[in-house]
Image (cartoon, rainbow, N blue to C red):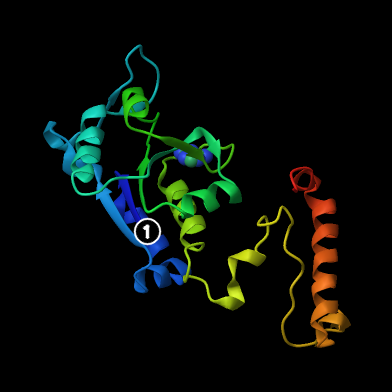
Amino acid sequence: MQIDIITVLPDLLVSPFSHSIIKRAKDKGLLSINLVNLRDYTPYARAQIDDYSFGGGAGMVLMAEPLVNAIESLQKKITYDDIIYLTPDGKTLNQQVANNLSLKKNLLMICGHYKGIDQRVRDHFVTCEISIGDYVLSGGELAAAVLTDAIGRLLPGVLNDESSALTDSFQDHLLAPPVYTRPENFRGWKVPPVLLSGNHKLIEDWREEQSVQRTQQLRPDLLKNKP
Ligand code: ADE
């Protein structure tokens, strides 16, 4: 999968994509991430990329021309399945959205800043608007990092069997069960004996039961959407 990200702060995104599972996905050639500096595409003096909002009001708006220059330049080399704008007024990201996007081949993400981007770019280029939650970040970069991580770990071959995405919370509308590792007894707090029984059927049943209990307790809303 190819993910291109248009941003005014490419440096901010270097670290999130240089570690752990996303690094492994890149190293294995399963994911390629291209950070595109918006300032490289502006025709305006002093690399200006934003301006005041027409009609007044506080906050700057990312101008249409640098964004469209960047998008159209990228589109000469690649056809995008989706052009995603990260914005607090987009569709809220959940596991289903991440699953669907992980099936695509080429994605372009646009990070907003300040008051956002000129509406005409949203109207004529953006195909999908995503929010990572009901709060406002200073820019779309951290949201693009979250979305890329959620998608990248789902690509076939990225996770090994032990960390399979199928057993993640939310994949079947249930939270994941509790997990334990060595030692068996820590300060007198013991691991549930069933996990040490070696009986895979019993362990599976226990985990399922714990998942349902945990979901009922912490996120009963998820059970309403369970197929
Ligand atoms: N940009 C600013 N806040 C955001 C949010 N909550 N989700 C996605 N992009 C954003």
Q: In the rendered view, does 22 fall on the left or right side of 120?
A: right
Q: Position of residue 8 (x, y in %)?
A: 29, 44
Rendered position, 217 above or below 161: above
Q: Position of residue 201 (x, y in %)?
A: 82, 78
Q: Position of residue 203 (x, y in %)?
A: 81, 77
> Between residues 112 and 222, which one lies in front from this camera angle?
222
Q: In the rendered view, does 136 fall on the left or right side of 36?
A: right
Q: How many marks?
A: 1
Rendered position, 35 above or below 138: below
Q: Secondary structure at mark 1?
A: loop
Q: In the rendered view, does 6 fall on the left or right side of 143?
A: left
Q: Residue furthest top?
A: 55
Q: Position of residue 88 (x, y in %)?
A: 51, 34
Pointer 1 local density, CA inside 10 Å: few below 14, some 14–19, many at least 20: some
Q: Which residue is mark 1?
A: 1
Q: In the rendered view, does 118 fall on the left or right side of 88?
A: left
Does residue 125 appear anywhere in the picture? yes
Is the N terminus in the top left, top right, bottom left or bottom right quadrant? bottom left
**Residue at 43% from the left image edge and 48% from the top image edge:** 144
> Between residues 176 and 161, which one lies in front from this camera angle?
161
Mark 1 Cβ inside 8 Å of ligand 1? no
* Amino acid type at mark 1: Met
Rendered position, 123 above or below 211: above
Does residue 186 appear anywhere in the picture? no
**Residue at 32% from the left image edge and 23% from the top image edge:** 120
